[in-house]
Image: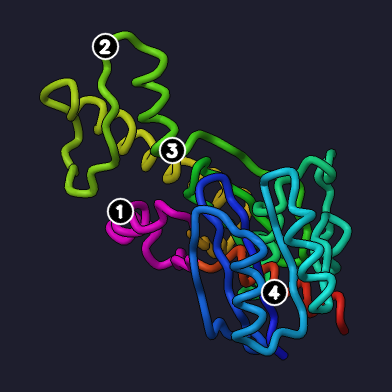
Amino acid sequence: MANLVVDIGNSRTKLAVFNNREICHFETHESADRVLINRLLDQNEITGSIISSVRDDISTLEAVLIDRTRYTRFSATAQKKINLSYRTPETLGLDRLAGVIGARSLYPDRNCLSIDAGTCITYDAVDSSGEYSGGSISPGLAMRFNAMHMLTGRLPLINLDEQFYDWHGHDTVTSMLSGVQNGAFLEVKGFIEVYSSHYPDLQIILCGGDANYFDTRLKNSIFAHTFKTEPHLVLIGLNEVIYQNND
């Protein structure tokens, strides 16, 4: 069974074709339109499809998928394996929920912490029984750099520097790099410590556009044996929802 999975995020759109539970084709674009969706449907024998979007209007894309596939409309109630005790499930970001579902499908008997290092950095844990009660959202790396530039009078706009490892800065630019990059890593490290104190034998799964930055630094930390980088975690979760709705 081939499924088309579409994840529309704040910064980019990821599309994957799954053959059962294995990705056989992957693309990423700034956005998706009918032409792109129809091309993927023409090139692959797609049976099922699903979209997760942080944007409002996906009706045009949905219309194509409804017409040509067995489409699953993703929502908090469309999945069956996670027990949501989140107080406002209707406001829960679908990308966060999909990441939790993906973590649960990869490690069904473990306590899991999904860390999505994208436009925002999100932390979401699901326990070994499938219970999800909530998580945390903080600014991502680019958002932190942009905020310092936009909300001050003199700080320049700079970007992530993966070669910067110093523990403090020696001028304005390196001080900004230290504040953002070291600050974000210490935040991630601190959240892992807190979640580990609440969830024994915690499996950490890292995804998102800045996952490689944190992956490099976590490999040199005491958490090296507890985490895995899975760039397609959200897509894996969405594909799992298709299966749950077609059993």
Judging from the image, what secondary structure is the residue with disc 1 in? Answer: helix
State how far apart marks 4 and 1 are (Cα). Answer: 30 Å
Q: Mark 4 or mark 3: which comes first in sequence?
A: 3
> Which residue is more in the foreground, 214 or 202?
214
The C terminus lies in which quarter of the figure?
bottom right
Residue at the spot 64% in from the left edge and 83% down from the top edge: 42
Discs 4, 3 touching: Cβ within 8 Å: no
Q: Mark 2 or mark 4: which comes first in sequence?
A: 2
Q: Which residues are magenta?
A: 208-231
Q: Nearer the viewer, mark 2 or mark 3?
A: 2
Q: Which mark is residue 154?
A: 2
Label 1, on which residue?
Answer: 217
Amino acid of disc 4: Asn
Residue at the spot 65% in from the left edge and 54% down from the top edge: 95
Q: Mark 2 or mark 1: which comes first in sequence?
A: 2
Q: Is residue 25 left or right of residue 106?
A: left
